[in-house]
Image (cartoon, rainbow, N blue to C red):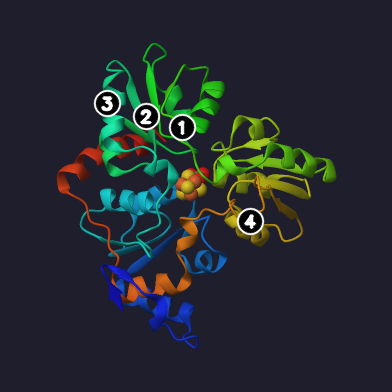
Amino acid sequence: MKVGGLIEETEVSALLDLEGEIERLKEDLHAVVLAHYYQDSEVQDVADFVGDSLQLSQQVAKTSAEVIVFAGVHFMAETAKILNPSKQVLLPDLGAGCSLAEGCPAPLFSRFRQTYPDHIVISYINCTAEIKAMSDIICTSSNAEKIINQIPKEQPILFAPDQNLGRYLIKKTGRNLTLWPGTCVVHEMFSEKKLVLLMLHHPHAKVLAHPECEAGVLQHADYIGSTSGILNYVKQSEAAEFIIATEPGIIHQMEKACPHKTFIPAPPDGDCACNQCPHMRLNSLEKLYLCMKHRAPEITLDEELRLLALRPIQRMLDMS
Ligand code: 13P
Ligand code: SF4
């Protein structure tokens, strides 16, 4: 049943073979299912491609599928639509947002940007199409350092919306970035104190962290990188134990690739499951099936906005 563009889950029988139905719908619709590493394991397992933000946008840029089903968050599906205006882009739950995108509203950012007229704007892909349209180049955590290093030294840079990633990039590149004060609700929740205690209990474990974490957590990391960077580190490392300071959805791929290694999620501050992204986890296998069955919710975009947002994404893909 469709309710205001959203779909209720009640119509799915517990006996339905969801994986089989999703496979059938992929063929019927000529659809590709893309999933981010932070999705539930069962959603990752039905995807044609699982990756980080950069890999997913590269995949989207070259897909020949007619329908793109994005098991991720809104800005990811929106990026897919910006790159593929003639294709239908579906997101299983339209409510799957991102605290970084929501914490950077276009009118406020526009004023912020006007305060620094000589700066070029490099925006993290975790932002809305409106912010992308006001940016010169988009980046992800995989390519941000590489992109900043291609900008002439004398050119001042405004970086939005993640200040933790921004601070990490200032350290890595030696550039004086002007930062928008945004944070990720998931990565800012990791507790440095609990991490240090965990490290004492697992002295041989390597600590791997996403650059969206706060500096206090990052200072303990043996490796800092994007989700795919962290996954590659695990695959190549000779260590047997790892503490993972990012959304634990990625541990599914780590366990598949390295079944004999041990992965310990870094603890959040408080007795909560708040190291799980509340937005990513809104998607489910049922919602994925229903969105393919009903071909909704669909991502739509104003064409003028799409064209403005496309330029900085295209620059990112060219510079990566
Ligand atoms: P990656 O590009 O590393 O996959 O990061 C996406 C994200 O949302 C991190 O919170
Ligand atoms: Fe956004 Fe953080 Fe969720 Fe990534 S983990 S989608 S940055 S809220």
Q: Callout 1: helix, strand or loop?
A: helix
- Residue at the spot of label 4: 251
- Residue at the spot of label 3: 111
Q: How many labels does the image show?
A: 4
Instruction: Judge from the rendering whether residue 114 lies leftward or rightward of residue 235; answer left or right.
Output: left
- Residue at the spot of label 1: 144
Q: Which is nearer the N-term, disc 4 or disc 3?
A: 3
In front: mark 4 or mark 3?
Answer: 3
Q: Which is nearer the N-term, disc 1 or disc 3?
A: 3
- The CA span between labels 4 and 3 is 40 Å
Disc 2 within 8 angstroms of ligand 1 (CB)? no
Q: Residue, x 76% and y 38% (percent of image)?
A: 196
Q: Is residue 255 above or below residue 295?
A: above
- The CA span between labels 4 and 1 is 24 Å
- The CA span between labels 3 and 2 is 16 Å
Instruction: Judge from the rendering whether residue 99 lies leftward or rightward of residue 195; answer left or right.
Output: left
In front: mark 3 or mark 2?
Answer: 3
Q: Callout 4: helix, strand or loop?
A: helix
Q: Residue 192: x and y, percent?
A: 69, 37
- The CA span between labels 1 and 3 is 24 Å
Q: Do labels 2 and 1 touch, CB within 8 Å?
A: yes
